[in-house]
Image (spheres, rainbow, N blue to C red):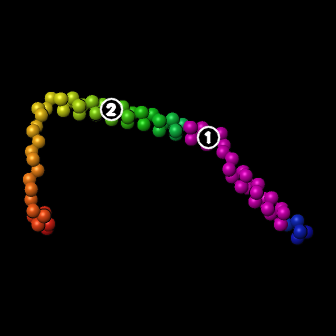
Amino acid sequence: MQALAMPRGVFVLALGLLLAGCATRDSVEEAQNSANLADQHAGAAASAAANADSHAASADSHMPAQPRRAPTKRPVSAMLP
């Protein structure tokens, strides 16, 4: 009887691992719905970002160009605390 105990234990363990990897229909549908919702949020975020870029470009076009100032030369000792 002891000789059968080990193979039966291995079989039960293998069966448990096999069944643990199986997904139910509900969990697959839930994962798909979650992915669809994430896609919708990503699309809305991309649209909002494009809208913000458009507004920024419009605001930039209404601003007069500012001349660039030459950087001032400060000694390194002035930058140290």
Q: Which residue is mark 2?
A: 50
Compared with 53, 15 (above or below) is: below
Q: Position of residue 35 (x, y in %)?
A: 52, 38
Contact flag, marks 1 and 2 (Cβ < 8 Å): no
Number of numbered labels in the structure image: 2
Determine the residue positioned at 60% across, 38% down. 29
Q: Amino acid at mark 2?
A: Ala
Q: Which residue is mark 1?
A: 28
Front in this rendered view, residue 3 or 60: 60
Q: Quadrant of residue 81?
A: bottom left
Front in this rendered view, residue 78 or 11: 78
Q: Amino acid at mark 1?
A: Val
Q: Position of residue 39 (x, y in %)?
A: 47, 35
- Say which label, 1 or 2, has the lower sequence index: 1
Residue 67 tag number: none
Please provide the residue range marked out in magenta. Answer: 6-32
Determine the residue positioned at 28% across, 34% down. 52
Name the magenta segment's main secondary structure: helix
